[in-house]
Amino acid sequence: MIEFSNVEQKFLHSLENARIATSHDDIPHVKPVSFIFHNDSILIATDYDTRTFKNLKNNPNIAVTIDIYKSGGHKAVCIQGESKIIENGEEFKKIYKMFYKKFAWVRNEPWNENEAPFLVIIPKSKVSWGLK
């Protein structure tokens, strides 16, 4: 498993928006998402009817970019890894509680097990820059 430095961890805990990339038929698909960094993994909520979910059912490989763009001071962590889909059970409940606590949009539109899954991104490689 990939481990993140203290500086990378602090950066990842400070943000809540990322972009993820999946693919279908060799066509890339990128979208913005909310995320939580937890235990050296990236947690993301999705819906069953999304292109992202369909892509990951066929190909679990995923890339994630978490960054702050500032000309001359760009900071980023880019991750490539594999996704695991969590639809129910204790792990689902634990992740849901974290999302409920962090994001108003979850509190405003709650859901139950098997209504919308979470993705756990297990990093296989990473690169970061601009972090101090």
Image (tube, grey):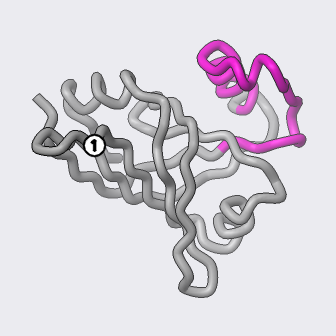
x 84%, y 24%: residue:
110
Q: Is residue 69 above or below residue 49?
A: above
The picture places residue 65, in percent across and down from the top left corner, at 38, 50
- Measured as percent of width and height from the top left, residue 22 is found at 55, 66
Which residue appears at 53% of the width and 35% of the height? Answer: 35
Mark 1 is surrounded, within 10 Å at the Cα level, by few (under 14), some (14 to 19) or many (20 or more) other residues, namely few
Q: In which quarter of the image is the C terminus?
A: top left
Left or right, 33 with reference to 104: left
> Depth check: 74 or 58 in front?
74
Q: Residue at x 35, y 53 (%)?
A: 79
Magenta-colored span = 92-118
Q: In this view, does 112 lie above or below 85?
A: above
Picture quadrant of residue 33: top right
**Viewer-side residue, 76 vs 92:** 76
Image location of residue 125, percent across then percent down:
30, 56
Question: Element type at marker 1?
Answer: loop
Q: Residue furthest bottom?
A: 25
Per the image, is 130 magenta?
no
Which three-letter amino acid code belongs to the residue tagged 1? Tyr
Q: Mark 1 points at which residue?
A: 69
